[in-house]
Amino acid sequence: MAMTEITFEKMDGVGIITMNRPESRNALTLNMVSEMGEAIEACQRPDVRAVLLTGAGGGFCSGADLKFVLETLENDDPKGLQDYITTLANDLHHKVVIGLRRLEKPVVAGINGVAAGAGFSLTLGCDIRVAARSARFLMAYANIGAPADGGSTYLLPRLIGASRAMEMYLASQPTSAQAALEMGLVNHVVEDDALHQHAMETAVRLAKGPTAAYARVKALFDSSWEHDLATQLDLETAAFADIALTDDFQEGIKAFTERRQARFQGK
């Protein structure tokens, strides 16, 4: 897979997707979004059992690259600007955000610096968020007179509550990693030089787990917002019944009764 704006590699059962435009703090372009979609699709393969999403250099992702937007404005082409923004948003939403949520593997975000705008939204689409102490979170949209995208209006209120989510949008001021931890926006904060190791260790640990069960729970959590309790209970029963037929479940039961560590294979 030839990539120019991201890198993709597999290590210890983990698919590592790295946004790779450090000169722009990994600002998103149409090409980068397309390549991310391809990488997410590649993570469907069975030898990838967890995913790590991170950024190269000193930033996670600064949002959409506004260079083209500025050029279009200078050319007095509002229709071209609208078409570009619509295409970028649609590709980001359907290829990346929905791709991450529907991926039947746990996804870890290794947030190594600023996560702003759509870059902030990308962190929300992941299952576990590990932040460097110097990381900063910024919705940023209001600063350019824009509404929010990237799924942030759906995912952020569910993480931190509607009031705090609205405040983050209206204020459009940076939130520190420590503040993000305290409000439940991230799971872990580590020193900058330990970020990659900690995020990778988290992903490797998940890759060694019962990934078939992880996939079901991920889907159950996402669907719970749409159902009443009775419906959700029925879905839980169906998921449990399916998992009971897997090798991993049977191995887990044997390991528990034999007082040993389970050896899960994702099957």
Image: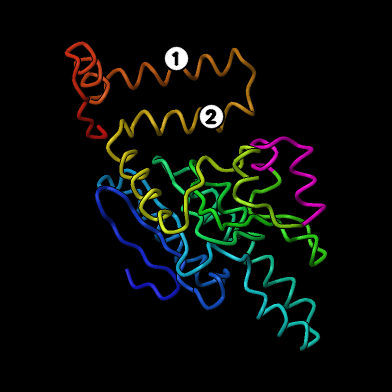
Q: Tell me if mark 2 has few (under 14), some (14-19) or many (20+) residues whose alpha carbon lies within 10 angstroms of its own.
A: few
Query: Dividing the image into 4 quarters, which one contains the C terminus?
Result: top left
Which residue of the protein is positioned furthest toward the bottom in this rendering? Answer: 75
- In the image, residue 190 above or below residue 221: below
User: Quick one: 262 or 81, which is closer to the camera?
Assistant: 262
The residue at the point 35 percent across, 50 percent down is 200
Foreground mark, 2 or 1?
A: 2
Specify the principal SS of the magenta part: helix
Query: Dividing the image into 4 quarters, which one contains the N terminus?
Result: bottom left
Q: Is residue 170 magenta?
A: yes
Q: Which residue is mark 1?
A: 237
Q: Is residue 183 left or right of residue 95?
A: right
Q: Of the residues under marks 2 and 1, which one precedes in the sequence?
A: 2
Q: Which mark is residue 221?
A: 2
Mark 2: secondary structure: helix
**Amino acid type, mark 2:** Phe
Give the residues drawn in magenta, as a range: 154-172
